[in-house]
Amino acid sequence: LSLIIEQDDPVTPEVLNETHFKSSLKYTEGGKSKRYNRVIVEYIDKALNYSAQDAYWPEKGSDLEQQWLAQDNNVLLEYRFKVSSCTNYYEARQMARVIAMLSREALNFNVTAAPIAMQFTVGDVVPISHKKLGWINKPFRLLKSEMQDNGDYKLN
């Protein structure tokens, strides 16, 4: 097991495309019911005598807040998350940002790939090309890789 800290990792030089896929690609996108345009992280602020405080993302009144609201037909899609292990505003705001961005940009897919997929490790950022979906070297983080009895790999 290895700990993966989400960061901007370099993309692997090897690309997977339709010629490597042994099954149809099944993908899911985050719809309106699964995304947020405001995330509030409730944390305990050490600087304010450990009182409960809120950190917002996006910031109230920001251009990003207005943009997301417009994309969601001006419907507030709010999510509140309480974390007791965080005592810093900036850490809480970063948590809110990550939760919000993941909810809005969630795109996952599953596919069975040829043995060439053996070169990838869970956590790698792999470029995927798929003509029908319009993906040209679209980067995806490999979350799961399972070797099959026939040498192919199930990738998520």
Image (tube, rainbow, N blue to C red):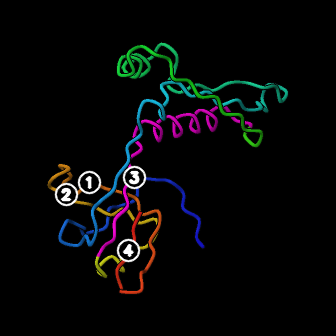
Return the disc, 4 or 3, that comes first in the chain's sequence: 3
Q: Secondary structure at mark 4?
A: loop
Answer with the quarter of the image where residue 127 lies. bottom left
Q: How many marks?
A: 4
Magenta-drawn segment:
87-113
The kind of residue on which mark 4 rests is Phe
Q: Residues within 10 Å of mark 1 (few under 14, many from 20)?
A: some
Q: Residues within 10 Å of mark 4 (few under 14, many from 20)?
A: some
Q: Which residue is mark 1?
A: 138
Q: Which residue is mark 2?
A: 130
The kind of residue on which mark 3 rests is Asn
Horizontal and vertical percent for residue 56?
Answer: 58, 25
Q: Are dots 2 and 1 in contact, CB under 8 Å?
A: yes
Q: Please tell me whether mark 1 or mark 3 is closer to you in this view.
A: 3
Return the disc, 4 or 2, that comes first in the chain's sequence: 4
The kind of residue on which mark 2 rests is His
Q: CA distance from mark 4 to mark 3?
A: 17 Å
Q: Which residue is mark 3?
A: 108
Q: Which residue is mark 4?
A: 120
